[in-house]
Image: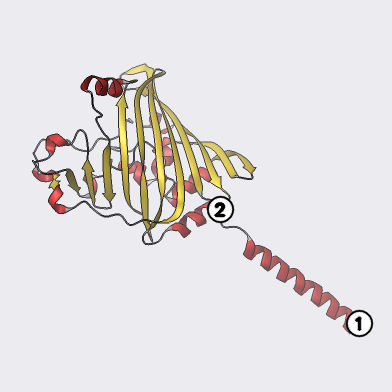
Amino acid sequence: MRRWIAAVAAVLAGSVLSTGVAEAQAPPSPVQRLKQQFGEHVGLRISDLGRIYRDGKPAVTIWRKGRVEFDTAGVYGTDTVGRTELGKGVVRELENQLGQRLGSTRVICFPDEAYLSGPGYETWLPEGKTWLGLIGPANIKQTAALPQIVNVFEPATLGTLLSHATSRKKGSYGTILQGAVTLRTLYKVSPSFRDRLAGPPSARSGRIPIGFRLWLDRAHLARRLTTTWKQPLPGRPRSHTTTVADTRYTGWGSPVTLTPPPPEDTADAGRVGPDFPAPAVLPIG
């Protein structure tokens, strides 16, 4: 009897131990993996391609690429180079006429300051200055968010995508999730999206779905996100715009240390003129 009791005890102990080991080896969730990336002077590279169509015709194309730096709380700074084209081939046609490239816009953004350089900002720059500085959170809301409106660097936003996925496809490369979230849901969970709007979306706009496809690598980190959403044009209910964004994420965990441009090359936007335009907001009613 004693031997039988000892054998049962050994089996039970082994079962508990095996269960504990299995639980300990369970892979972290994508949200946990994201939080594990947060630390001083580390980050990754991003690249964006965004297109806005009006009634099915291309109206705006936005390219962007650069680096993201984290701190222990999340995104600390971004340094991106971008280019925007209105219509189809308008910028290239103008470059051909001028015989020169118009160049790209570079934006370096931190929590309370941002620096902009490139075409479109020369008007506001005194002679000898190449950077325009914006100070204060209210002035920099739009500088680092385009063209992707869904921010997977926010744990709550990433978790919302995961919970709204209606299909999951696993492979040797990782997992592809597909689904949709409404503008109202995104507004509730995403601080960066709230920053881009003048206020909460209306009841009608809040129901607009944002379709998404999210690629996770084998380490459960985002490697690609595509989003698509459509909304009617203000005052023209029969016309609409469709926004499609495709963002790639590479080099997770890379060393990244971003710095502002030299002060001697920077002009304060608050001093370059009283008519400097206020940050734009997304046209969502």
Q: What residue did someone put label 1 on?
A: 1
- Closer to the chain start, of discs 1 and 2, is 1
Query: Which image quarter holds the C terminus?
Result: top left
Q: Nearer the viewer, residue 262 or 134?
A: 262
Name the residue at 64% across, 45% down: 172
Q: Quadrant of residue 145?
A: top left
Q: Quadrant of residue 282?
A: top left
Mark 2 residue element: loop
102 versus 221 height, above or below: above
Q: Tell me if label 1 and label 2 are in contact, CB under 8 Å.
A: no
Q: CA distance from mark 1 to mark 2?
A: 49 Å
Q: Nearer the viewer, residue 236 or 246?
A: 246
Q: Position of residue 265 (x, y in %)?
A: 15, 48
Name the residue at 35% across, 28% down: 61
36 versus 53 height, above or below: below
Name the residue at 44% across, 40% down: 185
Q: Which numbered disc, 1 or 2, marks the residue closer to the eye?
A: 2
User: Viewed as shown, does residue 100 lie left or right of 33?
Assistant: left
User: Viewed as shown, does residue 262 lie left or right of 271?
Assistant: right
Q: What residue did someone put label 2 on?
A: 219
| Residue furthest to the top | 238
